[in-house]
Amino acid sequence: MKPISDLTGHEVAVIGLGASGVAAARLAAEKGGDVYVSDSRTDDAATARGADLGALGVAVELGGHDIERIACADFVVASPGIPPSAPVLRSLAERGVRWISEPDFAARFFRGELIAITGTNGKTTTTLLVDHLLRASGIRCAAGGNVGGGLAPTASDLARSDDPPDWIVLEMSSFQLADVESFRPDIGVVTNLSPDHLDRYDSVEAYYADKARIFDNADESSTWVLPAGDADVRALAGNAPGRRVYFGDGPEADAFLDGDVLTLRTDGELEELLPRSEFPLLGRHNVVNALAAAVTARLAGAAVGGLSAGLGSARALPHRLEPVSERDGILWVNDSKATNVAAARSAIASIDRPIVLLLGGKDKGESFDDIASVLVGRARAVLVYGAVAERAWAELRASLADAASVEVEWVRGGLDEVVTRARVIAQPGDAVLLSPACSSYDQYENYEHRGGHFTSLVGEGA
């Protein structure tokens, strides 16, 4: 699709005044569009954001939505946090009005080539690693999208750049992919699949179906980077056209560990990148993320030397298996981003010390049996807390009934009480791992807020 450069004479309606909605409205206004933004909220944050947009000439409505005005717009952009069941989207659907996600809207203005990265876990790490590796090879690029915590801008903010890069690397969530229409990456990456967001989706199949929309506009020039031997991802890709490149284990892998060395197979030739022992990030899953990022960057033109140097200089991202402190022989690790069972399981398996696991938060409806199976032989104790605590305590105790070495304790209260209890239980040589397997919304604004609180609590005990 030829990039859009001007929206003069076009009406753009943006639903939601979150970060992505504000960014889409700014982009549309700068491109000359007649922009209307609405939000059902009237709180101070929405009011302040609305005032900022109003100063740009954007029409802002708080406390409701003008459905007729939205329905007449040339582009309707919906924030990803608004579920399809929301009254405003139901009303539009009844009128046959189609809306798109903010990255789909933004991508229409991109002038460089596009890498899009989705999956259940590892999206942010892989996205920012690809960006880091391309930069290490001297390639002009920019990363953004669903990346949280202020680590990267929205897609619309990237589209506003006066000096567009050669490559844009976007993290894409299932909520964003659900509403794509013309979105087509030059290189698409799926890191992995596992159940998630079952508090929003009726089934795992519905969640996977939204992920699969990354393939909707594929053509023979598309390239797909996929985990080797993953039947779920293979089914997700289906018969989508384009070249397939694989990372991980097995004979089909183009990026893999050759002994202890991260290695690529390019045009039949092996290219050694870095010994695993020299890769700074914790965990087997981060090695897999690195393989995915390395082969993706190589496809985008990165040199082997740049890949090697970039992998060696990688650093842990905040809230993702982030070592916070090591004191009195106890390592404290912030993995607050592990908001589902698969992510927590991966984190547990990556720690090579006895673990005191901190698990809790808002219940997303997942079974904790998979966590129980990986705790045996690895964990000293599991401290459960928050809204999910009662169910998690009962399930884990039942699953670990034959593993007397793993204590499961229900801690009443929040992270303050949990960290205090962990200090009592942990022994020299242990790791205290915050890998909650749940969302943070019972007590926090987001996983960053939760991880920041954990980090401050650990620091207070210095």
Image (tube, rainbow, N blue to C red):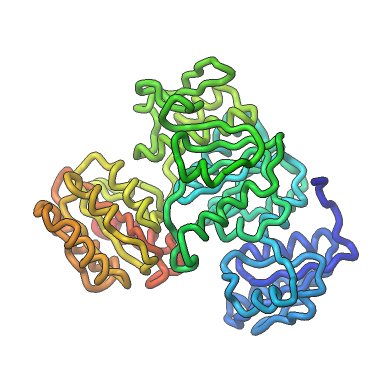
Viewed as shown, does residue 4 lie left or right of 380? right
The structure residue drawn at horizontal position 67% and vertical position 43%, both measured from the top left corner, is: 185
User: Which quarter of the rendered picture does the C terminus lie within?
Assistant: bottom left
Q: x%, y% of residue 198? A: 44, 64
Query: As rendered, which of 286 and 225 lies closer to the eye?
Result: 225
Q: x%, y% of residue 78? A: 66, 67
Vertical relation: 229 (above or below) 384: above
Vertical relation: 402 (above or below) 273: below
The structure residue drawn at horizontal position 70% and vertical position 71%, both measured from the top left corner, is: 52
Residue that sits furthest to the right in the current view: 9
- In the figure, residue 455 lies in which quadrant? bottom left
Viewed as shown, does residue 65 lie left or right of 345? right
Query: As rendered, which of 388 and 414 lies closer to the eye?
Result: 388
The structure residue drawn at horizontal position 67% and vertical position 60%, both measured from the top left corner, is: 102
- In the figure, residue 114 lies in which quadrant? top right
Query: As rendered, which of 225 and 212 lies closer to the eye?
Result: 212
Residue that sits furthest to the left in the current view: 404
Q: x%, y% of residue 283? A: 34, 39
Work out whether residue 28 can be spotted: yes
